[in-house]
Image (cartoon, helix red, strand yellow):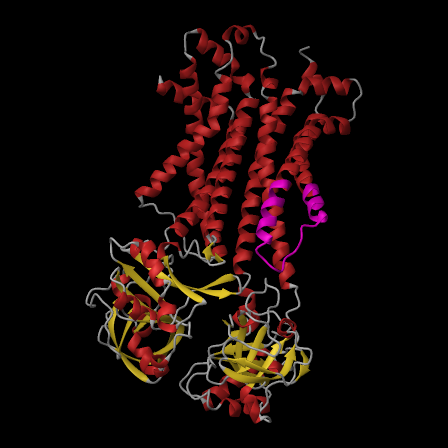
Amino acid sequence: MIRNYFKTAWRNLASNRFYSLINIAGLGVAMAACFILLLYVYFEVGYDRQNEKLDRIYKVYTNFRNNDEWSTGRYTPVQVADVLKKDFPAVEEAAVAAGPAKMLFSVDDRQVRLETLAASASLSGIFTFRFLPGSPQHIPADASSVVISRSAAKRLFGNENVVGRTLKHHNKHLLKVAAVVEDLPANSSLQFEALIPWEVLVAEEPSIKEQGWYNYSFITYLLTNENADIAALNKEVGGILLKYDNNKNNKLFIYPYADIHLYDEFKNGLPEGGRIRLVRLMLIMAGGILLIGCINFMNMSTARSLKRAREVGVRKAVGAPRKLLIAQFMAESILMTAIAFVFALLLTTALLPAFNNLLQLDLSVPYDSPAAWLIVTGVIVFTGFIAGSYPAFFLSSFRPVKVLKGSIAGAGRASVRPRQVLVVVQFSFAICLILSSIIVYRQVQYVKDRPLGYDNKGLIEFSPEGNLYENFEAFRREAINANAIVDGTLSASGINESFGSTWGVTWPGQLPGEEKLMISQMAATYHFISTMGLTLAQGRDFSEAYPSDSAAVILNEAAVKMMRLEQPLGQTLKWQGADRHVVGVVKDFSYNSPFDLSKPIVIGFRKDWVENVTLKLNPGLPVSESLAKVDHLLKKMNPGYPFDYRFTDAIFAEKFHAEQMLGSLAFSFTVLSVLISCLGLFGLATFSAEQRQKEIGIRKVLGASISSIWLSLSGEFAGLVGVAFVIGAAASGYMMKQWLMKYEYHTNVSPLVLTATLVLVLLICMLTVSFQAVKAALANPVRSLRAE
């Protein structure tokens, strides 16, 4: 019996090639899109799963009180790890870390910058590392050692058997390779190419030993005991700052390491989602696109019900029960889905490189994973069941007496309303995606077009290594004299990077409690304003001509407004525990996130915080020539350190990566969903034209014009798309409003966007159905009426 069903199914596929191809193509494209999105979801939810003790690993965060609200930071004072290990029996292991950051390593004449993490040796007791054969299975607590990854070993030495070999760190210290580990997977939150023991960092920066509890610059990890009471431990950890620093404003808390990738956003001290939103969106898109493919199948199957009616009647007449007929049609659906799966697999393999390039990932089809094949099998069965369920129940409901008498002429029309509903559903989803893609694109462009408040063209950034820090002014003068640059400055970070925040800033006329306000801060030196192209509203830049500038600060207009300073110049503030006088006010500028409104910021003169060089290249020379001149000077004045720079405008462009990725994803899968919907629409239009041949012939004989016949055939579909637009626009408007609300600086949904989208969708719809409509209108009526 089952064999007979599949033979019949194959015969039906072969005899209706056109409609079968439409169904297979629609299902195949939908399944391919679904598979690609599920691969991404599988990658995201698999983050950090390589750690064997993941359920017991925690990271320490800090909640900072800002008036009546809390802001959450991912860093702690350096002492926290030791306190956790010493005071808390529930903590099995604790580790402190810093980085990762690009650091210079060299072997002979080969120099390589590696992403380097400094951490205490206990890190290997918390996280799972795969040490290569011949390496000790732990991180040594030796101030002359280093652990490197397999790929770093090949870059430095040309092979991976390098335990015991020596390399130079920052052209200063000789370190011995103590171990080589496998490269960490791409979906690991912890990443490094080189891992130096904490003692190495302390030896290079002895001031770390003297850091007070006020410096929140370090990462703390911990591993709890198997039976630890996490709620009780969290409560106890929250009292550390009060106990050791008498700090009543800030609180530490532990957060599950398994959650830090997907749930990494906090609001008022509590977790509030994060990348999990994108994962959920990908799941919705995968399900929605697969549903569109299934709807195509349902529509085509029910629309062609008359073609199968006599077969159903005969089978029922000879005693076939309804459940076996349902099984037959479900078998046909699953067979077609299986064929579509082969097409989908080929399509997935072809499209995956483009998807990887879009997301900057390296996803691949896990052919050797039983779990993946189990999921795929589930998708095939689920798709076959969903796609075939309605047609199976609809076709099996025909009454054999009416069928065999030929009195079910209205059967095809009986399924019109459900088909219309299904068309509305699939186009609603497609329209929702179209509008969402447009809004994401407009938001990114809106922020990109926002005045920055500084000039990032021709700015380059790099680290002041070697003797450059001490000799920077001499280098700057020579570079200006060589016409390589027009200015340069030293600062704590680039203008696009997070400046950090502080509290305890006091100013004249301050109200009680305002000293607890979190205020952004930036440490800079001479020529900061002129190099960055900031606009002075009052006063001046830091200058060597004023020795007192070593205790000076510059405010932005937002800070002046917040502090209510009518005459800010010359006013004395307390910043970083010392009195500072205001020498300048700059107009507000965008820093850190371009999506945020300008916040108050204090730019303080601090040479001891400098970690970044910014140069303004000479706009009168080609960029390559200016860079060559800078490179030549650096080799002369700071030999042994490669000139590795980044353009400030490129760093700024990276700020839009997440939004652009979301927009590109939405656009790509919007195109696929529209393509699938149009395939189904084309099939329905073809069948509608076939069913109405006699009607069209009569209309033409009675004098109907081609345009009126075209309108008659196309109008039904245009009306359905109009209804779908209302539903899709409402859904998109609600979701995108919620998405835009997370940005302080955001665009609005313009009526022009809605109108343009409606016109675009109607145009696509009309183009899809017009071929068949015009073909039917131009057909010779004699052919359709000669049997009458």
Above/below status of 136 relative to 680: below
Which residue is drawn at the image coordinates 65% and 72% (left, top)? 561
Seen in the image, is 472 located left or right of residue 533?
left
Q: Based on the displayed image, in which of its 4 quarters is residue 111 positioned?
A: bottom left
* Image position, residue 478 (x, y; %): 55, 91
**Viewer-proximal residue among 196 and 589:** 589
Quadrant location of the C terminus in the rendered image: top right
**Viewer-proximal residue among 565 and 465:** 565
Looking at the image, the residue that sits furthest to the front is 512
* Image position, residue 442 (x, y; %): 64, 55
Does residue 752 show up magenta in the picture? Answer: yes
Determine if residue 256 is in view: yes
Main SS category, magenta section: helix
Which residue is drawn at the image coordinates 43% and 28% (left, top)? 385
Looking at the image, the residue that sits furthest to the right is 703
Above/below status of 749 relative to 34: below
Determine if residue 109 is in view: no
Quadrant location of the N terminus in the rendered image: top left
Residue range in magenta is 730-759
Does residue 430 show up magenta in the picture? Answer: no
Seen in the image, is 209 located left or right of residue 475?
left
Q: Based on the displayed image, in which of its 4 quarters is residue 372 positioned?
A: top left
* Image position, residue 247 (x, y; %): 42, 70
Seen in the image, is 551 located left or right of residue 233?
right
* Image position, residue 745 (x, y; %): 62, 60
Above/below status of 703 relative to 235: above
The number of discs equals 0
Which residue is drawn at the image coordinates 60% and 88% (left, top)? 483
